Amino acid sequence: MTSLQTGESWMMEILNGHYARSKNNFRMEKELFIELCNDLELKYGLERSRVTIIEKVGIFVYALAKGASNRDLGERFQRSGETISRSFHEVLEIITGRSNGFKGFARDMIKPTDHTFQSIPSHILHDERYMPYFKDCVGCIDGTHIVACVPEADQMRYRGRKTFTSFNVMAACDFDMCFTFISAGWEGSAHDSRIFLHAINTPSLNFPKPPEGKYYLVDKGYPDRRGYLVPYFKTRYHQNQFENVGPNNAKEVFNRAHSSLRSCIERSFGVLKKRWKILNAMPQFSVQTRIDIIIAAFALHNYIRKNAQDDDLFNIVAQHPDYVPLDELPDVFDDDINHGSHRETSLEMKNIRNNIASQLWMMH
């Protein structure tokens, strides 16, 4: 590594230069990047060494933003592969807190803002399409597939309905596009309902269950049970299905509104993947490290959402509320799979669905 420009000097050039350079390289404003460095050091214990805090965090965030390999990072920061690896994993550990029971930065970032779910989300409160019909909705749940490069012997388990090997990651989000829960690490072949049931039935995962009378929006791949509102089956649902012919009955009106409101999580996944290129082409890491990188990407997504004053990606989504990224196309469901042994009909949720549908149809 013989370049006159060291990694530290490059970091200083970026942070003291044009604002666009920080956004291009670290996917956040330079002021926010410095704030992140301070938080990881002062609140979570990231330690200084011969590599500065700013350079360590720079190595890590640049890797996520660019999907850069160890060799690429070594060239960019003029460090040995060993130093790059050590710095990357130090920051990763601080963010995930794996060695401390996952009590780290990520746990503080990925949680509901209001644990009681008593207030009506402003996204619903101030939109006549959803208020008062969905006033008791607390968020959305869905799964997304993230590329997994695994040994050939394990590829069958990681190859599900997608054409590539992947992790099936379940997440819950609020209507401000912040993730409130994630379950990472499941193989791509794992069914959404299996991951969901494990999450809500495993106390140690601390899934934020909705209180009595509240509910999440979920799609047809999830069980129909109390606290989780699914759309009507065998009825038009996705927004593009209503482009030429509008809803013809109460069920279709409900499904269109349900799909529109639930698209919040699809858009959140889209912003996540567009910001962190590593999620689309992850370098060679152990499965455990890949899972931790996924957790870190979700945590940093929330950190930016909560602290950025003017973020380009979130602004694009705000200006185009019906935007759904191409890599989050609607899933195709097999009725025999989704409505068989995992289906649990809830009379309470059926009544809620029918009442909302009737109200929406009257106002249609």
Image (cartoon, rainbow, N blue to C red):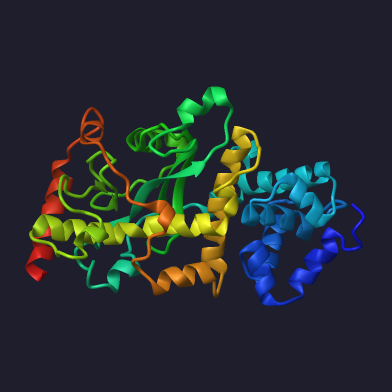
Residue 84 is left or right of residue 176, and the answer is right
Quadrant in the rendering for residue 119:
bottom left
Q: How many marks?
A: 0
Residue 28 in percent (x, y) is at 62, 66
The location of residue 350, given as percent across then percent down, is: 14, 47
Q: Going by the image, does 247 lie left or right of 308?
A: left
Q: Position of residue 340 (x, y in %)?
A: 21, 30
Identify the residue shown where x is 24% and y is 63%. 135
Q: Is residue 112 visible?
A: no
Tell me which residue sits at (56%, 25%) in the image: 152
Q: Residue furthest top?
A: 153
Residue at position x 42%, y 59% in the image: 325
| Residue in view at x 73 percent, y 54 percent | 59
Pick the residue in front: 106 or 241. 241
Relative to 68, 233 lies left or right: left
x then y, percent, for residue 173: 40, 54
Front in this rendered view, residue 89 or 279: 279
